Image: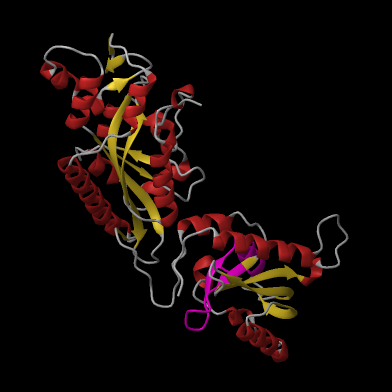
Amino acid sequence: MSITESSESVFTTEEEESFSARYSLWIKEALDELPHNFTITDPFIPGHPIVFASPGFLKMSGYSREEVIGRNGRAFQGPKTNRRSVMEIREAIREERPVQVSILNYRKSGSPFWMLFHMIPVFGKSDGKVIHFVAVQVPISGQEHHRKMRNGSGLSGDMSDYSEMMFGSCRREVCFGHLVHQDRALPVEFDEQELENWEHCEASESEKLRAAEAISNVLSVLTRYSEFSGRLVCGKRYCLRGADCLSSSLVISLGRIKQSFVLTNPCLPDMPIVYASDAFLTLTGYKRQEVLGQNCRFLSGVDTDSSVLYEMKECILEGQPCTVQILNYSNRKDKSTFWNLLHISPVRNASGKTAYFVGVQVEASCRNTESKELRPETRQLSVVGAVRVAVRSSFMVTC
């Protein structure tokens, strides 16, 4: 679907909070003053949408801000966009690392143009998690590519005027048999073979330096304005001692699992919880910040059977799964207890090493409930399988 098919604003409350709340109410004004073409995206919102687009980017692409915010960057790709370049960008997002590639994008008018795409992740300084991605776009002049196309296209005469008018061949627009300069079509014919040559257009060193400078300037503004909210960001991942840095792709995958479970890291001192599902927080009454970094024994109390705790400890030391019924304590107002049907299982990485343990909880009162749902034990094994798939398919920090 074309980005222009919906003219209504797509700037949601979630996207507002993703951006302004992270920095300050004045962050947009500060970024608007930068002369660069760039966008900022949020990987934690479904669809990884754009949450900010600079005036330079809007002018370059021909779109309004209302048409861009809330859209994924693939909306600017088209039939001649190199799939390999797209995959490079996707892999960089999944691995949470910088990337710099040349790519053919499309303006609102439908005319394609070459640009240097330089993207970096922005990390939260307190927990090391990716907050946003900043992507700078620098139009490519491509003078050497221009000479190749001129010599092979059958054009005659002095092309210096055309070169100046076209901003270089890589920024010329090729639109199904015609050269297009912004809104003006030039009747120059191309065949399919010549169109294929457009898959290879490299940026110059000066253009790469411009992109790097733009990235530095945008990151500087984000860092400075994050100090106003106290939610500091930076361009390098920092992990607190005793905490685990889960990749955003892994967190998103785990967030799709709706059962109650926690993920713990045996490589860290005291095997802390590094992820807790929303269902777990509902079951226990704790907030996420009260859970992360804790050992699971914080749910135990005076009436918890110590022999069950010992059985769990032995299975963990041996790297074996186990299922127990244990009395746990909630953080609800009445400080109530609940019987927890708990299944613990190791989660191994691609090399076979135990990277995490997953603990899946089912309130025992639900065990004998007459329903058409799957048995608790079956649901627990299903969660374990889903967690294993998420871990193995994500790039993450391990010990």
Counting labels gives 0
The x and y percentages for residue 74 are 43, 35
Give the residue drawn at x 43%, y 78%. 242
Q: How is the image coloured?
A: secondary structure
Q: Quick one: which residue is furthest to the top in this view? A: 187
Taking the image as shown, residue 172 lies to the left or right of residue 394, namely left
Give the residue drawn at x 24%, y 14%. 154
Task: Point out the image quarter for the C terminus.
Answer: bottom left
In the depicted structure, whether residue 52 falls above or below residue 364: above
The x and y percentages for residue 151 are 20, 21
> Is residue 283 within the magenta segment?
yes
Q: Which image quadrant for residue 163? A: top left
The x and y percentages for residue 362 are 73, 68
Work out whether residue 249 can be spotted: yes
Q: Which image quadrant for residue 344? A: bottom right
Which of 275 and 21 lies nearest the eye of the viewer? 275
Work out whether residue 168 can be spotted: no
Q: Which residues are magenta?
A: 262-287
> Is residue 212 within the magenta segment?
no
Which of 74 and 222 lies nearest the eye of the viewer? 74
Give the residue drawn at x 69%, y 70%. 361
In the depicted structure, whether residue 290 falls above or below residue 113: below
Q: Quick one: which residue is furthest to the right in this view? A: 370
Give the residue drawn at x 22%, y 30%. 145
In the depicted structure, whether residue 310 falls above or below residue 130: below
Which of 182 and 131 lies nearest the eye of the viewer? 182
